[in-house]
Structures are given as structure tokens and as C-alpha cells.
Amino acid sequence: MQNLEYKPRIADEILARELEGMGAVLIKGPKWCGKTTTAEQIAKSIIYIDEPQNVDLNIRASEINPSQLLEGNTPRLIDEWQIAPKLWDAVRFTLDRRKLDGQFILTGSAVPPEAKEVKHSGTGRISQIIMRPMSLWESGDSNGSVSLNDLFNGKSDIKGINSSNIDDIAYFICRGGWPRATLQRKEISLRRAFDYYDAIVNVDIHRVDGAQRSTERTKHLMKSYARMQGTQVPLTTIRDDMRPNDSPSLDERTVYSYVEALKKLFVIEDMPAWNPNLRSKTAIRTSDTRYFVDPSVATAALGIGPEALIKDLNTMGLMFETMCIRDLRVYADSLDGFISHYRDKSGLECDAVLHRRDGSYGLIEIKLGGESLVQEGVKNLQRLAAKIDTEKMAKPSFLMVLTGTGGYAIRRHDGVFEVPVCCLKN
């Protein structure tokens, strides 16, 4: 089912790997990030549950005899499965009978079915992977001259030339990693993030869990969240930021319900804190860092484009950080890892810690550009590395400052890697 316009995704390999060892794989993630298209590349047969001329028939069939919808060459893609939620238990039952791996791929909207309609969790039978919007390496905007996997394996003689400038970075931030946008000319591609934002506030926020929610309040929340990208502010701060445009009686519980709804839609993806073993006792901040799943969601919520971003480099720095975190999360998935952040009571912080399941990790600071900011990032990394008790845990595999506008990817004389994001890959 090959698509000639398809740009290979890091999830391709992850999906193939999961299908080798599990009966079925559920692909989760934000709408428009390419879940169905990626699944189509490996599927040998497909049923689109929401196909207009067959949707009612498919729903009835799923309630009367769901097994007939599962017949076909494997792996069989069941797209928008949540429209006919009885298919979940039918897939689990079929896997128990076939006792074969690689049978089904399930994709669908971020709006899940009600829990009462699914009787079995699928544990041990249905694996789950998360897809996000494209990283710069996947969209073709990074040359991939520096590999995170190589750094974990001890490579130190990195080389890379960055041809992207500040205007390019601003465009990448506002366009986002939406697959369709990466195939369109610049003026058209910038509309995709606004279309996504409009769909969230006008449609999806009302469908996610059946609760009544306000479009205007959702807009206020997303604008506030956009202004606080990369910070560890509590919900009370977000509530206070919303109140001038909302009701004075707006409470924290209401804000929480909206945030949770946006998390279910994979619009918000906050980052957990890291609690390493340190040489001396230090109070570590445990609040999550606030992020959208893609920086273009933040710029769309603020109603700004590349030109406005370049005029406000402080805001651009926060949006650049969100873009880098998106990319690092995509790369971490392929490295069997995850991302967290560090901050302690002294104010020392590290923007991203890339952990792997084998216990190795790398420390990464994110700076848009400028020698003074890069040097600040280097000092933060060195201070944190010196605090880690390497008798109780491994030392960092690498220290990196991830930049936007640097001309070259280099290993500095102090051993810290300085890498433009448009030179990075997994």
C-alpha cells in the first residue's frame, strides 16, 4: 500500500519491530500526525471503519459478527477502530485463537471509546506505540550528520554543517511537523497548524469525553499554555493568567479538567522531572514542564507566524525548545528511551535528559543561539554532571548543547558537544 509521497518515519521501524513480537499494535497520537499513512505502508489488507458508504454497515457487523471484519491478509489495518469499539475485544479473542504475531494494526482518532465498551485491556496481546508530528530529520529539514545513537556508543569525532538560519528555524517552528505540511509550499503549509488548532477548540474538545466545554475557555487555556512553554508553572498560575479573559470564579479544578482533556487528545505532552543520585543532598523540583506536542500548536494559539516570532526572540527561544523536545522524544522512542528534565532549588536545570533502558543517559541543554547562551548551557551541564554521584549511577554518556543557528556540529575542547538541531537524528 505504498504512498509515493510518503516520507519514511522513525515509527516505521518501531512498528515493524513491535509486530514481530506481538499479535497486534495500537498506534496512538495526535490527529494528523500520520498514524494511518504509516500503518498503510506495512499493512497487507485494510478496512476503513469510517468509510462513508460502509460506516453504518461496519458498525452493525462489529456488533453482530465482528470476526468477519478481521478477515484479510496480515498484518490487517483496522483504521478508526474506536468507531466500532467491540472490535478491540474481537481482536484480542482472535489473537488468542490464532496464536500468531503481526496480525493486526489498529489506528484511530485520539478520541477514545468509553471504557465500558472495552472489556479487556489487551495486555500481552496488543502493544501500544505513540506517534508524534515529524521530527526535522523525518521531514528532511535536518541533514542527520550527528546521530544520538552514535554518541551513546562513544563516538566523539562528530562533524556537521548547518545550513539553516534564523528564518528557517522560525518557519520550522510555525509549520510544525504535520506530514502534509512538509509537502506543501511555505505559504500553504503554515495554514496547517491553524487548521489543527481550530479543529481542537471547535470540535475535538467537545468530543473527547462527553463533558460540556467552552470553545472560548479552551482558547484562553491554550494561549496561556503557549506563553508558558518550557516552564514548570502550577495550574494556579495558568488559571490566574486566564482569569482576565475568563470568569473571575474560574477555579483550578476546571483548568485541570481542560488540561486533562487536551492530554487525552495528545495536544499537551508535559515532561516529568528527573531525580538522579547526587553527591550532596539537594532539593529537586518535581513539577512537570509544560509543553505542547508540537511548537506550531503554541504559535497557532498565540496567532503568530515566523515574522512575529523573529521579532520576539524570547518567545522564539521557548518555541524552539518545544520543537527540540518534540524531536528528542521522537528520537528517544527509537533508542528505547524517554525524556525528562532536571531542576533543583538552586535554580540549576537541564532542559532534557535522554534516558535509555540500559541505564545510560545524556544531558542536553537547548539554546536558540549566541555564544553567551551556548556558554551558559555548557556551564549548566558541567555543574549538573559534577553533582551526579557516579558511584551510585553511571556517568552521562554525553553532554550536549542543542542549538538553532550554529554553523557547525562540533565537539568542544571541554568535551561538550555543540550540535545544531538541523544536524541531529536518532
Image (spheres, grey):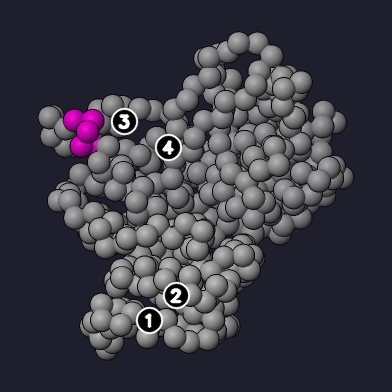
The residue indicated by pointer 4 is 290
Q: Secondary structure at mark 3?
A: helix
Earlier sequence position, callout 1 versus callout 2: 1
Report, in whole angstroms, how far the alpha carbon at label 3 lies from the one at label 1: 46 Å
Left or right of 265 on screen, residue 136: right
The residue indicated by pointer 3 is 235
The residue indicated by pointer 2 is 94
Q: Residue at x 12, y 29 (%)?
A: 249
The residue indicated by pointer 1 is 67
Earlier sequence position, callout 3 versus callout 1: 1
Earlier sequence position, callout 3 versus callout 4: 3
Read off the magenta span. Answer: 251-255
Earlier sequence position, callout 4 versus callout 1: 1
Label 1 with label 2: CB-CB less than 8 Å: yes
Left or right of 385 on screen, residue 208: left
Examine the residues drawn in magenta and state their main secondary structure: helix
Residue 220 visible (yes or no): no
Residue found at the far front of this picture? 97
Dot 2: few (<14), some (14–19), or many (≥20) neighbours within 10 Å? some
Q: Amino acid at mark 2?
A: Thr
- Residue 308 image point, x, y percent: 42, 47
Dot 1: few (<14), some (14–19), or many (≥20) neighbours within 10 Å? some
Report, in whole angstroms, how far the alpha carbon at label 3 lies from the one at label 4: 10 Å
Is 299 included in the stretch rendered in magenta? no
